[in-house]
Structures are given as structure tokens and as C-alpha cells.
């Protein structure tokens, strides 16, 4: 029941209300990869970048195609609008150093090459971050093999 309500909030772009309902599914062990992808979006929308990255890293480590194969239309993915907001600085509550990491995550839903470029920028800002480095290597290998 809470997943249906969460999806309803997600569709209406009320991410703050969808978030705790999706988290309930995650904590109960009922969260599919589809729910986890929506959770990433919700976390980013409310400024919980570290939580988004933790879940993002988990999914990409498992299989990058979980996110790459998202269809913005059929999956009702708000990434294009969110990308626009972050690229045009309409999200001032997030520190500018975090923007490349956020855009790297969002772009993987719709443009692998741009995602890689933003993760490269994120790694430049935080060269000791092993998770970003690992993700970047995985995505670069995948891009070369396609």
C-alpha cells in the first residue's frame, strides 16, 4: 500500500512525501531496483546527496544498466528537469562542490557520456574518494565496450 502512495507522490513530484514511504519499503526489504532508483531521485530532490550516492553506488556496482536503461518517459523519470535545475543553479541549498556528483548521478539516467564527464569533475574535486574513482572506472569501461 505504501508503495502505491509513494508512487503517486513521486508522479506528482512531491518527493518529500514519497521519500519516507519508499524508505519504509527499503527498510522492510521490499525495495526493488525500481524503487531504489526512485529513492535516489527523492534523496537528491530533498538535498540528501550522501544517501543518494550510497544507494546509487550500490546499484551501479551491481549493474550500471539498472540506471542506464531507465526510460525517462515510461519510467516517469524527472531527471531532465532536475538536471536543468542543478545546471542553472536553481538549487542553491546544495554546495557547488557537490553539483558535479549530483549531475553525474542524474545524467546516468539519460546520458552516460555526460555522466562520466561530471563524475570526472567530481573526482577532481575529491581525488581521494575511492567510490567515485571506482564508479568512474566502471562507467568508462562500459562506455568503451559499447
Image (cartoon, rainbow, N blue to C red):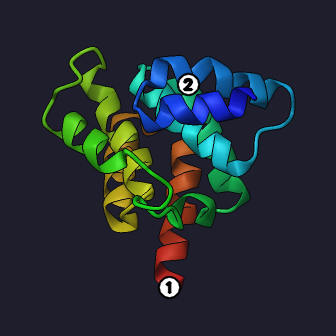
User: Residue 126 occupies which quadrant of the picture?
Assistant: top left
Residue holding disc 2 = 18
Left or right: 15 in relation to 93: right
Image coordinates for residue 137, horizontal then vertical, percent: 54, 62
Image coordinates for residue 74, horizontal then vertical, percent: 47, 61
Q: Is residue 62 above or below residue 51?
A: below
Q: CA distance from mark 2 to mark 1?
A: 35 Å
Image coordinates for residue 2, horizontal then vertical, percent: 71, 26
| Image point (43%, 50%), residue name | 77
| Image point (70%, 50%), residue name | 33
Furthest residue to the left?
A: 88
User: Residue 78 occupies which quadrant of the picture?
Assistant: top left
Asked if residue 121 shows in the view, the reply is yes
Image coordinates for residue 146, horizontal then vertical, percent: 50, 85
Q: Quadrant of the N terminus?
A: top right
Asked if residue 48 shows in the view, the reply is no
Left or right: 93 in relation to 74: left
Contact, mark 2 vs mark 1 (Cβ under 8 Å): no
Within 10 Å of disc 2 (Cα), the crowding (few <14, some 14-19, many 20+) is: many
| Image point (66%, 28%), residue name | 22
Nearer-N-terminus badge (2/1): 2
**Of residues 1 and 113, which is closer to you in this image?**
1
**Of residues 33 and 92, which is closer to you in this image?**
33
**Secondary structure under the numbered disc 2 in the rendered image:** helix
Furthest residue to the right?
A: 29
Residue holding disc 1 = 146
Amino acid at each position: 500500500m505504501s508503495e502505491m502512495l509513494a508512487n503517486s507522490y513521486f508522479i506528482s513530484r512531491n518527493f518529500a512525501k514519497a521519500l519516507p514511504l519508499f524508505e519504509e519499503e527499503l527498510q522492510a526489504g521490499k525495495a526493488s531496483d525500481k524503487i531504489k532508483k526512485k529513492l535516489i531521485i527523492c534523496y537528491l530532490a530533498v538535498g540528501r546527496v550522501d544517501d543518494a550516492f550510497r544507494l546509487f553506488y550500490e546499484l551501479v556496482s551491481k549493474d550500471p544498466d539498472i540506471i542506464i536503461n531507465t526510460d525517462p518517459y515510461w519510467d516517469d523519470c524527472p531527471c531532465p528537469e532536475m538536471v536543468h535545475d542543478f545546471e542553472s543553479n536553481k538549487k542553491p541549498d546544495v554546495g557547488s562542490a557537490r553539483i558535479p556528483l549530483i549531475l553525474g548521478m542524474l545524467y546516468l539516467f539519460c546520458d552516460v557520456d555526460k555522466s562520466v564527464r561530471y563524475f570526472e569533475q567530481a573526482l577532481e574535486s575529491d581525488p581521494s574518494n575511492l567510490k567515485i574513482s571506482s564508479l568512474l572506472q566502471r562507467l568508462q569501461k562500459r562506455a568503451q565496450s559499447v
